[in-house]
Image (spheres, coloured by chain):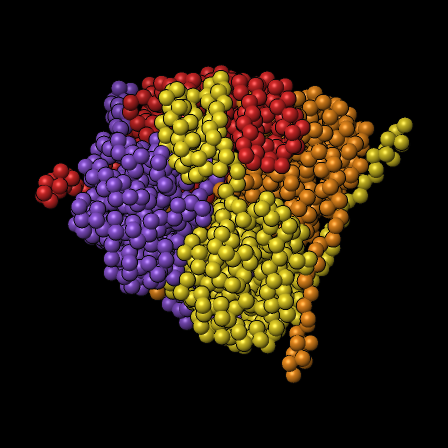
Chain colours: A red, B orange, C yellow, D purple
């Protein structure tokens, strides 16, 4: 931590900061510039006491140097983590494709979808039982009934399932029926929920909040690891920006950055990331190219009749096209005569 | 709702949309343009079925016309709502000032703060018992102990108190000790929590999420009203943007807009809105000028020793200065000779 | 400047940074922490050479400490600047109201508008001759003809005029007809234009770019002052965010911040700031309350027939209502019994 | 265009809108709903006159249906455009890699860079002569001297060059020395510049503004095509968001969207898109996977000594690693037993 004193800071103000740094368990280290003085807090003390010095007289700015997360960091664990569930390894060599409807609507709907996505190459099934909906008048999910359908289809299809959890009260029930618990984007900083999920023996899929920085996202994951659950998969699903043609701005560079900063597997959700079925094949390829360990894609037997997110869901044929797109090689770089040839020709 | 067909839509595709609109309980109404056809869905049907038509073949875009919220709307209730608690009327003629520490840290801290802010003109006390913190390693609040301190200081000071609720499990306990329950910005779309608070007989202070549009904010409030609780106060506290000099971008126009669209009282939080003590007097004045029904301001006996949000808290003298700034008249408009004078002079 | 070395930085890497800091004209100053080393660059050297060290091996991050602007800063000039033009003092004791149409459309239109806004209390006239339009198919302004109309109406009304400049090629012509030259939001970082305007003996109204930080805005103004023109007025006109109900997010806290950091006068544009006529009275009051030195408001005799920005323009009656709103006192703070009374009563 | 009347609109207000739509050259078409009336403007009239109806009494909102751009649209030209320059085809089958320093600093610097990037597979050279810099105190480019160096190195290397143009006054001089003119992100809506470049017989590289929607970007390109220059290449280079770990948010989905909406070639700039050398290989792969027709990458012989953008430039070895990354195949999708096998096994 560095405490940057104002150019008008007095000697007693500097002395006060030095003393407070010592009280907080750090060693103070002064650098006197031409215009201003900088005081570094060296060592491992109580970080928040330095942060609060922002309010001390003569202080212009407190700047943090080290990253605030620990257990999720590659500094603590350089090798990549793999999350295993039901025979699927997220973070392993292959890209894991999770597909299924936004909401579980009926046994038939989920059964046929599982069949179709599995045939096309998906190895996990998604389906919502409890739905976070912007409006109270929208379909809120079938709840327990949906969980039971998920269980059944998991059995028949052999696909492990992930479903969203919205409340600490539902933890036991959902753990009984699902292989992985999803924390939705709007709950990324629902710390009561995170603390509860930290104590559960199930993997957690942690979606990035629509306005969360990568750092905040990793700190949300830190809640899970710090509480004892290190089976965590991160999921980029788009952030909110001024762009209105797409539902969100799909931040694919954040996938690469999160994998640089953390050992946790990172997957991507092109359905929410763009909200546009016509773009999903292209951005899914991009997500794989940037390093994503998996994809989670919304698929529905008849999107125009879906009870939620129909506008961004693929039908079965559309999903197959996406899976085929993932097999196509990258477009080649346009060739050029080598410099050697050119310089020889000029000689 | 309007379904805008693509310029390449075929007659069967248009006919299909017309039929689906009828199925959804609306009357279809066609407008055939030179290049494209528009189908309006007239009446009151099942909205989501029209939204899902986005996925139907030949459809370019589904556009909603009416606002999606109802009970919070001024169309339903044109007169302004007033929320009364402990002798304070939020939404009444006077601007209500709520002040206090970010976190309750001790009986002494809260007692002295209550005394100071009351003397300066505040009529409600804030103080956190359960704190949503970005990092699991930060101070998380004193919990029940803090609630008890709040109760005591409420008694001695006569100031009603508001405190944040983070989990459905804490509802009963917090209701016992507080006059108003705050839903923090990061929980604005914690729908499980909203649904639970809709059943409580206490006013709710609903902060706007850092990336929530005004419409999403009002829809979150709609959860409370639709569930039976209409004692709701909205609170603007800044949104996330690219600007880095301030903690958030304080969206004061949204205060005016929310009051235009909804009958609910709207207050503003300049502490989180800017994160800069030096700006709080100016933006508090602006919040009052734009129409806010109240202010909620962080005050701490010694901000540089605060366990949370010290950097943006005011000390007692700073808070007094803000209260005095609220009494100062608006700067006058620079005078000008009247047009009449000018034209006479020219004649 | 501070160079924060990575926790894996080697001694030769640190030595290299130290040497480069010396080469750049600064004194290096090391702080060795438990995990990492920090090297401060003390003195006044070549800043960009330190910034480029970001790319040196072993460097994690280069952090700037001092603000990058100089001449616009209150550190250089603590007293507030006043820009005088045609008898109007922007930055003086009174709030200056500039009003007029988005585009000059005809002599009659501008003449009647000038008459109306002057009668209501405006002391300056705005009107576009060259219009920056998102689409090439939109009305682009009357050009020279509009400038001549502006000149005439300035004569008859006595109101000094401001008009937008879009190209270095138009500088002489516009200087001949206008009292103040406006740099539009989209040209805030048109550095060729700024450099040319720095050499002109006319005040410049510099609008904040839709995605410019306050720092970038002040650095754009620095181009003008560094080039010799210190008659500069800043104008906040809203930034782009995810909010879609309003044209922009009107960043009123930035007005207060810009006035804290800089001595230049700052005005606000509620028309572009919100894009909603129904909000203009409220946010204009807020702008004055937050400290704005003036307002610039779009007014048109018949907004629904305006050739540009009709949707956000006020008609004459609407503008009068705004001017009256600026005269109304601030809503009062709700009273409370003093703490003394309460404690006495309890004794 | 659709004019959505308020639920309180009176019959005379509706009649007025109908009449104005007719005056504007459209056919009005009414749809009367239960709560409100919608009036569609059918045909091809004067669009802005309908937009201005936003200000008419009784109107709630005017909604545009058709996209506002024409010549850049795939509706006008379904096949993809190819821009040819100096033997390079942007938009052709191969991905074109443009590389070089941010600024031209010396003949040696540019010569060695050209040699290195060509050897690694680049087929075009970039290098700035006139630099748009946020601060007036930063290096502003060598100007004409840099243009001459670019010419020379173009000759010796055989690589066509692209360089940025900041002012209409420099057009002739830059056309003489460069193969392609770049409009920088901050000048995307410098309409005076766009109008001038529309008359030039050279290809233009149009960068997306940091806060421009895809629609605004395409409308900026429309200025070029409408003015007569259809040799236009679009370039995504990141947008401004709340994320602070990267310089910009690299909007790769926008590359796919722009290619869907327009026939123009689209390239991507990972250097500005992320500002982080460590991410460039990953996001370059992603850009190619999403459909980009090319990449433009900053390379410098010694980034830590670069006069501009050193922090985000690659050195020669780093650029070679990126080129190699572009050759690597996509990671494979994790296999799954087919549904058929599973159902057979269950039978």
Tell me the residue at 39%/53% (across/down). Answer: D187
Does C221 sit left or right of B60 as displayed?
A: right
Tell me the residue at 83%/34% (across/down). Answer: C339
The residue nearer to you, when weighing C175 against C60, is C175
Q: Is residue B58 visible?
A: no
**Place of residue D48 in the rendered image (x, y in percent of width and height, measured from the top left):** 44, 66
Q: In the rendered image of this protein, does residue C295 appear above or below residue D134?
A: below
Figure quadrant of residue A151: top left
Figure quadrant of residue A39: top right
Q: In the rendered image of this protein, does residue C50 appear above or below residue B60?
A: above
Tell me the residue at 25%/41% (across/down). Answer: D108
Figure quadrant of residue D347: top left
Does B174 sit left or right of A62 as displayed?
A: right
Q: In the rendered image of this protein, does residue C11 appear above or below residue D220?
A: above
Q: Residue furthest bottom?
A: B347
Q: In the rendered image of this protein, does residue D290 appear above or below residue C92?
A: above
**Place of residue B37 in the rendered image (x, y in percent of width and height, measured from the top left):** 37, 59
Q: Assign the N terminus of chain D to one quadrant of the image.
A: bottom left
**Place of residue C333 in the rendered image (x, y in percent of width and height, measured from the top left):** 76, 46
The residue nearer to you, when weighing C135 against B264, is C135
**Place of residue A280 in the rendered image (x, y in percent of width and height, measured from the top left):** 33, 40
Q: Is residue D169 visible?
A: yes
Q: How many marks?
A: 0
Tell me the residue at 64%/81% (across/down). Answer: B346
The residue nearer to you, when weighing B21 against B196, is B196
């Amino acid at each position: 931590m560095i405490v940057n004193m104002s150019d008008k800071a007095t000697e007693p103000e500097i002395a006060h900061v030095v003393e407070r740094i010592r009280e907080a368990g750090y060693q103070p280290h002064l650098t006197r510039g031409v215009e201003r003085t900088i005081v570094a807090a060296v060592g491992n003390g109580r970080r928040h006491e330095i942060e609060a010095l922002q309010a001390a007289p003569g202080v212009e700015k407190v700047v943090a140097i080290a990253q605030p997360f620990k257990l999720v960091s590659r500094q603590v664990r350089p090798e990549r983590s793999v999350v295993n569930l039901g025979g699927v390894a997220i973070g392993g060599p292959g890209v894991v494709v999770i597909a299924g409807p936004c909401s579980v609507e009926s046994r038939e709907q989920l059964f046929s979808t599982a069949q179709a996505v599995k045939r096309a190459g998906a190895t996990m099934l998604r389906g919502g039982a409890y739905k976070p909906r912007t409006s109270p008048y929208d379909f809120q999910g079938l709840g327990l009934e949906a969980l039971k359908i998920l269980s059944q289809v998991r059995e028949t299809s052999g696909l492990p399932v992930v479903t969203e959890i919205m409340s600490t009260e539902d933890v036991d029930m959902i753990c009984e029926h699902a292989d992985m618990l999803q924390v939705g984007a709007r709950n990324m900083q629902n710390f009561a929920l995170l603390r509860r999920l930290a104590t559960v023996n199930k993997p957690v899929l942690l979606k990035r909040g629509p306005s969360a920085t990568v750092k905040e996202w990793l700190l949300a994951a830190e809640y899970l690891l710090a509480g004892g659950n290190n089976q965590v998969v991160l999921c980029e699903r788009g952030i909110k920006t001024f762009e209105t043609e797409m539902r969100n701005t799909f931040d694919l560079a954040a996938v690469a950055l999160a994998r640089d900063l953390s050992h946790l597997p990172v997957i991507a959700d092109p359905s929410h990331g763009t909200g546009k079925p016509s773009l999903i094949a292209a951005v899914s390829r991009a997500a794989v190219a940037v390093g994503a360990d998996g994809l989670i894609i919304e698929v529905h037997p008849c999107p125009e009749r879906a009870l939620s997110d129909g506008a961004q869901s693929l039908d079965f044929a559309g999903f197959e096209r996406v899976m085929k797109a993932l097999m196509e090689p990258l477009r080649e770089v346009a060739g050029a005569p080598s410099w050697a040839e050119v310089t020889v020709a000029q000689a």
